[in-house]
Amino acid sequence: MICIFEHMDLPTKLAILADAAKYDASCASSGAQKKSSRDGRGVGSTGGAGICHSYAPDGRCISLLKILLTNRCLYDCHYCINRRSSNTPRAAFTPEEVVKLTLDFYKRNYIEGLFLSSGIVRSADHTMGRIVEIARTLREVHDFRGYLHLKTIPEASPELTALAAKYADRISINIELPSQRSLDTLAPEKNLLRTTQAMGRIRTLVDEANARRRDGDRKLRHATGQSTQIIVGADASTDSDFLQRSADLYTNYNLRRVYYSAFSPIPSPSSVLPVKAPPLLREHRLYQADWLLRYYGFQANELVGPRQPNLDLRVDPKLGWALANREKFPLPVQTAAREELLRVPGLGVRTVDRLLQIRRHHRIRLEDLARLRVSLDKVRPFLITADYRPPTRLLDDERLIHRLTPRPVQLALF
Ligand code: SF4
């Protein structure tokens, strides 16, 4: 193992610890087209080290310095390049260095906040204590008002977690895998119950802070929510396992987001890992299904279940559900309930809400849908409007799936 962090200069540490942080998907630039600026040229890279983009609670897109405090770790999670047994160059910032980097970058307008995570060194409390110390110094000594996203460690004491929540805007704990069985195989030191217990404590803190805000304490600084990351394709867990776990996290722990991160083979991989990454489309379908759970009133078991444990990669999950439940269509757009319209492929939340307003004033025709930029080809089989009723054979047609999905395109070979 290469241990060289004693006399390492700051740019080298930054290169190692920003690169090591890139595997954490808990920020919204994950999945963006990679544009490398490693040659020192170009602006706006999402693939080069250090800066990522995320969304603040008010919806603004913000740039964050995304780093690890250290990539040393006591744990040996097989899917992680920073695991104890990995032969990767190691580095560690001092808390003062992280504070200085954050303030320097912020003052130069490179970033609007900090996303700080860490490997676990000495103990969970020792590591968490350093993370909290950085956040406290930024907030209390330097009056730093930028965005702070802190990763917390489930095994850290509740007092340190509470302090982290007090200083951060967003707090997260990575659940990593959907079941204890998977953790036992790939992350033997991790415990699902400890993680969910820590999430429960954070939920209580966030709920209390939000209640104080509602009671008029507008200046209260406290995390407004928590999120987590789950790794897809590192073991045999099915989409049903992921979505059932996500539904549990949204319902019982009030998570803001579950980030799905397709497992990517790392240098010097452990032999228990698959050699190939899962198709990125699987991650995309899980995000689509997750969206349906959060905003469209779907239950996880409507999208996946024992008979079909994985999402159909050929179609988006809403279309897949509609094709499997054709007897529920076509729906009269004039009288159908909001929750029914939300299930129509091609209709989003905003469009449905606009349709509910418009139909108070006149009977909805296809041209109203076109004016709302709805794809008529997509909705025609599922809706009845004042001037259109789909022929019965259209919904019964077994080839409907081919009509509603884009034709595969041969990519250039050279
Ligand atoms: S605890 Fe975190 S940093 Fe350490 S090996 Fe596991 S995933 Fe990697």
Image (cartoon, rainbow, N blue to C red):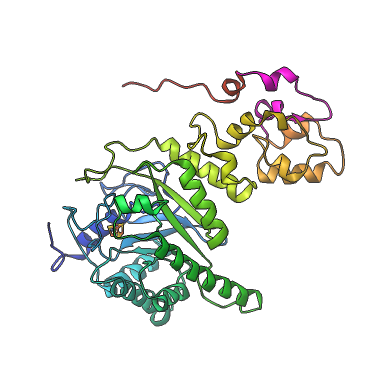
Q: Which residues are magenta?
A: 374-398
- Rendered location of residue 187, percent (x, y): 30, 54
Query: What residue sits 27% from the left and 48% below the top?
Result: 38
**Spot occupied by residue 115 in the image (x, y as percentages of width and height):** 39, 62
Residue 315 vs residue 329: left or right?
Answer: left
Quadrant in which the N terminus is drawn: bottom left
Q: Is residue 397 magenta?
A: yes
Residue 314 is left or right of residue 360, and the answer is left
Point 37% across, 37% down: residue: 278
Foreground residue, 392 or 93?
A: 392
Q: Position of residue 138 (x, y in %)?
A: 39, 76
The residue lying furthest to the bottom in this view is 141
Q: How far across and down, in percent of the image, does residue 325 sit? A: 66, 31
- Quick one: 294 or 188, which is closer to the camera? 188
Numbered marks: total: 0
Taking the image in four quarters, ligand 1 sits in the one at bottom left
Q: Looking at the image, which residue is at 54% across and 46% down?
A: 290
Q: Which is nearer the eye, 214 or 244?
A: 244
Place residue 52 in its image quadrant. bottom left
